[in-house]
C-alpha cells in the first residue's frame, strides 16, 4: 500500500484526535485574535440602538440544552444590550426545552437582577404549535398564552403587558433558533401582516439560508458563536463567544490541513496510476 | 375590501393554474417528466441490497405532519412506498425509522400498501417500522442501526435537521449507497458532500410525483413549473423596470 | 372536507378579516385548536415511546429488555418528580441539566468530528462541482473564523461576496421553488387530491 493511498485513507480516529486537541488547546491557552464585526451583526445592534427607552422587544426562543454552546453567547449579549437600554423584553418559547433556556438566560445575565419582573421583563413560557403558535401569538398574545405568564400570574397583573396585545404593539421581535422554518415563519406571521421588524440569532448552518432576507426583511442575523463574539465586541463585554473563537480558528486550520492532505494524496495516487 | 390584494390575485391565479393542469392531466393529457437520477438509482440500490442479502434503510429525518414541514414527510412517504414496492418485488428487507409519532401511521400504511400491491403481504414485517423517538433518541438509534445492520442502501427523504450528517456519514462509513432528498436547503450541503445522489428542494416534491405516476400529481408539477416561469418573468420585469427608474412592479406586488 | 373547510377559513381570514370580522374570530379559534392538538401530539409522543419500550421489555432480546426497562424507570421517575417538584430549580433541575444537557451536547458535538471526516473524504479535485464545493468551503471556513482575516484581510470581502451574491441568488431560487411546491401541496390537500397524510390509498 503506497504512502499516497495511506495518506488518502487515514484512520478517522487520527482525525478525531487532531480536532479534539485543536479545540481544547486554545480554550486552555487563548490567543485572542481580533474579530471583525460584519454588517449582519451591526444590523441588529443598530436597530436596538435606535429603539427609545421603554420600547418592547419580544425574544422568542426555540432552543434548549443541545443548542447551548452556540446560543449562550449571542443571547446573553443581546439580552444585556436590550436591558442596558431600558428596553422591555418579553420572553417566550415555541420549543419544549425553551422554558429551561429562558430560565438559563435569567440566571446568566447579571443585569436581570437590577430589573423588575413584570415591569422590565416577563416570561410567557411555552406555546405549542410551530407556525400556528407564531400566528396565534402575533394575532392575540393574551389569548395565545391563556391570559397567564409562565408562573401563572394573570397578565392583567403584569404592567409590561398592559398595552401589548398583538405583534403591532411590539417594536422588534428577535427569534433565537437552531433549526426549522422559524425565521421565515416569523416573517410570514409577524412582519408581513403587522410590519413588526424581525431579527434572528441562528445556528451557523442556518446563516446562509437566511442571508437572502437581509437587510430588507431581516434587520440583523447573529451567526452563532461568531455572531455572539461580534456582539460582545460591540457592547464591550467579551465573554464565552470571544474565548471560543480561538478554538474555532484552530479547528478550521486543522480541517483545512486535512482537506489539503486528502487532495495531495489523491493527486499522488493518480500520478502513480499513470 | 380585500387586504393584500396582489397576494390574493396571485393566489387565485396559482389555484386556477394548478386546478386546470390537474384536470387536464386527469382527462388524459399527462405531462412527461424528465427522469431524476436519484430515483433511477433507487432500483440499483435495492437490487444491490437484494444481491448482497442486506437491508435497505429509509428515514425521513423528522417526520412532522403537524407543521409547515409536513409536506416533506408526505413527499417522503411516496418515495418510501415506491422503495417498498421494489423491495417487495426483489425480496429485499426494508427498515424504516420514524422520529415523530404522527409519522408512524403514514409510514406503516405506505409500506404495508406497497407489499399488498406486490402480492407479498406475507413478507411485510411490522417490527421493521421503528419508532425511535424524537431528537437525540433518533440520532443515536439510527447511528447504531446503521453500524449494526450495515444496510446496502441508505435513503433519506424528508425534513432532516442536524441529524443529516450523522446519518449520512455513518451510512457512507458502512458502505451503503446513499440517496438523499430534502427541501431543508441548509442541509443539502452536507448531503452533497457525502451522498451518492441528491434531490434538492423542490425535486423532492417532484420526485414523489415521478414515482407515483399519478396524473393529477404530474399535472400539479407541470403547474408548478408554469408558476415558476411566471415568477421568473416577474423578477426579470421588475429588474428591468427598477433599473429604468420605475418601481411599478414593486408597488403592484406590495398592494 | 374538514381539511378544506379549515384551510379555506384560514386563507379567507388572511384576505378578508377586516371586512368580515367573523373570519378573524374563526381563524383565532382554529389556531387555538391547533395549539391544543400540538400539545397533545407531544403527549402522544411520550405515550408512544413508552408503549414501544414496554413491548421491548416483553421481548426476548436481553439487551433491549434491560435498556428499555431503564428508560421506562427514568420516564416514570422524572415525570412524577417534575409534577411534584418545581422542574426548573433544585435537584430536579440539577439532574436534568447534568443528564440531558451532558448527553445532548455530547451527541451534537459528534457533528464536529463527522464533518471533519466527511470533508477530508469528500472534498477532492475529482469533478468541477466537487472542486467548486471545496473552494467555497475554504472561503467560508476562513471567512467565519478570525484566523482567516489574520492570514489574509481580503478574505472578509471575498466571504461577504460569496454570501451576498452566489449564495443569495441560489438560495432565493430554491426558496421560490419550495414556496411554489408548498402552495401546490396545500392547494391539493384542500381540494382533497392529496390524502397520503390521512393514510390514504396510493
Image (cartoon, grey):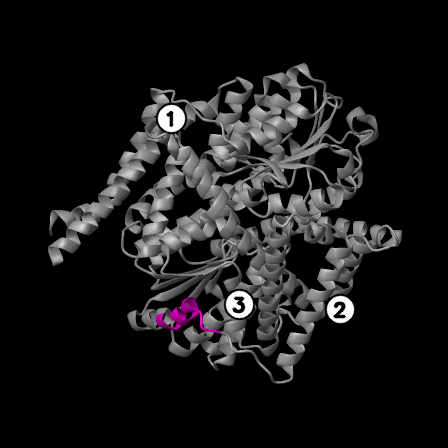
Element type at mark 2? loop
Q: Measuring 51% from the left and 50% from the top, which residue is drawn there?
A: C169
Tell whether label 1 touches label 3 (CB within 8 Å). no
| Mark 3 neighbour density, 10 Å: few (under 14) some (14–19) many (20 or more) | many
The quarter of the image holding the N terminus of chain C is bottom right
At label 1, counting other C-alpha atoms closer than 10 Å, the crowd grade (few under 14, some 14-19, many 20 or more) is many
**Residue A60, horizontal then vertical, whole percent:** 65, 36
Compared with residue C64, is residue C2 higher up or lower down, i.e. above or below? below
Disc 2: which residue = C1
Q: Which residues are magenta?
A: B34-44
Which percent across, then down, holds residue B180?
Answer: 43, 59
Residues at marks 1 and 2, CA–CA distance in whole angstroms: 58 Å
Q: Residues within 10 Å of mark 2 (few under 14, many from 20)?
A: few
**A269 magenta-colored:** no
Quadrant location of residue A40?
top right
* Front position in the image: C124 or A150: C124
Amino acid at each position: 500500500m503506497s504512502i499516497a493511498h495511506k495518506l488518502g485513507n487515514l484512520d478517522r480516529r487520527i482525525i478525531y484526535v487532531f480536532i479534539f486537541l485543536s479545540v481544547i488547546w486554545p480554550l486552555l491557552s487563548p490567543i485572542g485574535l481580533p474579530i471583525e464585526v460584519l454588517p449582519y451583526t451591526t444590523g441588529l445592534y443598530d436597530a436596538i440602538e435606535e429603539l427609545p427607552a421603554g420600547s418592547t422587544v419580544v425574544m422568542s426562543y426555540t432552543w434548549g440544552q443541545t443548542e447551548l454552546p452556540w446560543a449562550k453567547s449571542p443571547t446573553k449579549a443581546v439580552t444585556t444590550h436590550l436591558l442596558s437600554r431600558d428596553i422591555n423584553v418579553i420572553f417566550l418559547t415555541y420549543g419544549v426545552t425553551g422554558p429551561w433556556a429562558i430560565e438559563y438566560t435569567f440566571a446568566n445575565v447579571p443585569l436581570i437582577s437590577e430589573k423588575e419582573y413584570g415591569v422590565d421583563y416577563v416570561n410567557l413560557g411555552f406555546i405549542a404549535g410551530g407556525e400556528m403558535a407564531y400566528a396565534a401569538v402575533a394575532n392575540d398574545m393574551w389569548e395565545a398564552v391563556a391570559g397567564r405568564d409562565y408562573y401563572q400570574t394573570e397578565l392583567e397583573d403584569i404592567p409590561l403587558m398592559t398595552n401589548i396585545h398583538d405583534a403591532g404593539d411590539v417594536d422588534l421581535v428577535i427569534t433565537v433558533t437552531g433549526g426549522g422554518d422559524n425565521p421565515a415563519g416569523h416573517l410570514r406571521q409577524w412582519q408581513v401582516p403587522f410590519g413588526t421588524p424581525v431579527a434572528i440569532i441562528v445556528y451557523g448552518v442556518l446563516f446562509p439560508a437566511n442571508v437572502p432576507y437581509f437587510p430588507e426583511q431581516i434587520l440583523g442575523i447573529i451567526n452563532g458563536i461568531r455572531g455572539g463574539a461580534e456582539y460582545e465586541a460591540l457592547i464591550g463585554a467579551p465573554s464565552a463567544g470571544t474565548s471560543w473563537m480561538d478554538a474555532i480558528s484552530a479547528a478550521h486550520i486543522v480541517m483545512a490541513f486535512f482537506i489539503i492532505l486528502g487532495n495531495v494524496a489523491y493527486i499522488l495516487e493518480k500520478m502513480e496510476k499513470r | 375590501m380585500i387586504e393584500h390584494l396582489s397576494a390574493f390575485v396571485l393566489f387565485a391565479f396559482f389555484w386556477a393554474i394548478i386546478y386546470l393542469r390537474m384536470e387536464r392531466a386527469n382527462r388524459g393529457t399527462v405531462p412527461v417528466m424528465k427522469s431524476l437520477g436519484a430515483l433511477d438509482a433507487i432500483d440499483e440500490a435495492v437490487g444491490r441490497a437484494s444481491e448482497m442479502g442486506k437491508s435497505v434503510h429509509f428515514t425521513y429525518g423528522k417526520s412532522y405532519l403537524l407543521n409547515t414541514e409536513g409536506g416533506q414527510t408526505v413527499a417522503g412517504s411516496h418515495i418510501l412506498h415506491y422503495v417498498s414496492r421494489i423491495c417487495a418485488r426483489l425480496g429485499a428487507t426494508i427498515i424504516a425509522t420514524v422520529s415523530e409519532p404522527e409519522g408512524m401511521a403514514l409510514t406503516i400504511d405506505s409500506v404495508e400498501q406497497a407489499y399488498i400491491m406486490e402480492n407479498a403481504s406475507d413478507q411485510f414485517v411490522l417490527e421493521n417500522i421503528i419508532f425511535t423517538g424524537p431528537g437525540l433518541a433518533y440520532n443515536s438509534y439510527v447511528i447504531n442501526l446503521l453500524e449494526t445492520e450495515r444496510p446496502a442502501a441508505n435513503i433519506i427523504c424528508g425534513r432532516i435537521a442536524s441529524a443529516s450528517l450523522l446519518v449520512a456519514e455513518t451510512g457512507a462509513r458502512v458502505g451503503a449507497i446513499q440517496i438523499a432528498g430534502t427541501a431543508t436547503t441548509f442541509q443539502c450541503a452536507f448531503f452533497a458532500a457525502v451522498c451518492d445522489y441528491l434531490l434538492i428542494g423542490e425535486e423532492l416534491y417532484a420526485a414523489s410525483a415521478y414515482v407515483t405516476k399519478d396524473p393529477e400529481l404530474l399535472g400539479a408539477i407541470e403547474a408548478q413549473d408554469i408558476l415558476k416561469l411566471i415568477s421568473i418573468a416577474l423578477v426579470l420585469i421588475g429588474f428591468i423596470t427598477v433599473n429604468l427608474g420605475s418601481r411599478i412592479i414593486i408597488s403592484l406586488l406590495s398592494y | 372536507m374538514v381539511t378544506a373547510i379549515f384551510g379555506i377559513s384560514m386563507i379567507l381570514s388572511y384576505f378578508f378579516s377586516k371586512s368580515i370580522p367573523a373570519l378573524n374570530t374563526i381563524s383565532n379559534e382554529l389556531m387555538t385548536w391547533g395549539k391544543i392538538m400540538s400539545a397533545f401530539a407531544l403527549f402522544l409522543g411520550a405515550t408512544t415511546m413508552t408503549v414501544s419500550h414496554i413491548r421491548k421489555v416483553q421481548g426476548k432480546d436481553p439487551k433491549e429488555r434491560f435498556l428499555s426497562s431503564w428508560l421506562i424507570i427514568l420516564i416514570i421517575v422524572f415525570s412524577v418528580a417534575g409534577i411534584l417538584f418545581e422542574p426548573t430549580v433544585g435537584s430536579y433541575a440539577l439532574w436534568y441539566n447534568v443528564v440531558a444537557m451532558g448527553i445532548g451536547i455530547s451527541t451534537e458535538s459528534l457533528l464536529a468530528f463527522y464533518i471533519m471526516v466527511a470533508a477530508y473524504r469528500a472534498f477532492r479535485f475529482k469533478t468541477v462541482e466537487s472542486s467548486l464545493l471545496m473552494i467555497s468551503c475554504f472561503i467560508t471556513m476562513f471567512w467565519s473564523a478570525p484566523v482567516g482575516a489574520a492570514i489574509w484581510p481580503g478574505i472578509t470581502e471575498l466571504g461577504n461576496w460569496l454570501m451576498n451574491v452566489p449564495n443569495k441568488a441560489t438560495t432565493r431560487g430554491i426558496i421560490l421553488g419550495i414556496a411554489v411546491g408548498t402552495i401546490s401541496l396545500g392547494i391539493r390537500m384542500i381540494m382533497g387530491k392529496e390524502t397520503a397524510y390521512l393514510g390514504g390509498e396510493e
